[in-house]
Image: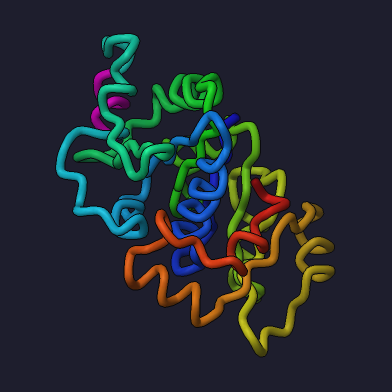
Amino acid sequence: MLIACWSPKGGTGTTVVTAALACRLATGHRGALAVDLAGDLPAAFGLAEVDGAGVADWLAAAPDVAADGLARLERPVTSTLGLVGRGRGPLPAGPADALAGLLAADPRPVVADCGVVRPDDPAGAAAVLAAGATRSLVVLRACFLGLRRALDAPVRASGVVLVVDEGRAFDVDDVEAALQVPVVARVRVTEAVARAVDAGLLAHRLPRTLDRDLRRAA
């Protein structure tokens, strides 16, 4: 199973949602794999920056890469959670559909941080991976600009992860009515979540509120 998390604009919390989902799924007997197309997952997991090869390098080498090439790029986050970093250089779009198929076939649940999927780049690697995922989750804050960009996004999401801020005018019903996609999780921005992210503790001490909020999205 491949779960792709993405957003039509930056600053929505996509990386935190991706990291938390991966940590939650890693508690299962098969473990889990996180895949980084945006570049911030190592920091979210409290790891040193990944300087070696990663997704970009795999895409650049495909289709000549060895069958176990992706596995060679994986590094441990915990004993049950692995990470394939972004790597170096641009993300070639051509082999992205093959990457989506490879990740979806992994026996572990895979969660990918696709970052921002822009309307002007419908054939980009992030858009192709998000479109080819088993579950495509758009991460949004309940604001007008986010909804507007989500309507123009080149990817049809299968669910919405709504990051909840106080004082926003839109609620779950408004988002579902606008996008015609169900909200599968409401993620509350709490002090505990902010502290865990800032301290790089998500992989080892996932806040209970975040764990509960993402139950339906996993």
Q: Main secondary structure of the magenta part?
A: helix
State the count of labels: 0
> Could you say which is closer to the camera, residue 73 or residue 192?
192
Q: Quadrant of residue 168?
A: bottom right
Vertical side of 194 occupied by 149: above or below: above
How far from the left and from the top, in percent, is residue 155? 61, 43
Magenta span contains residue 94: no
Q: Percent x, y for residue 163?
A: 61, 69
Residue under the point 64% across and 87% down: 166
Viewer-proximal residue, 27 or 20?
27
Query: Looking at the image, is 93 positioned above or below residue 90?
Result: above
Residue 110 shows in this picture:
yes
Check the picture and name the quadrant holding the N terminus.
top right
Q: Residue furthest bottom?
A: 167
What x and y, as percent, mark residue 76? 31, 38
Q: Nearer the viewer, residue 79 or 191?
A: 79
Query: Position of 140 compared to 191: left or right?
Result: right
Q: In this picture, which residue range is highlighted in magenta?
A: 56-61
Q: Does residue 64 appear to the left or right of 83 in the view shown? A: left
Rendered view: 161 above or below 145: above
Q: Residue at x 33, y 23 (%)?
A: 70
Counting from the top left corner in percent of width and height, residue 123 is at 47, 35
Q: Decide if residue 60 is on the left or right side of residue 186.
A: left
| Residue at left offset 78%, top offset 52% | 181
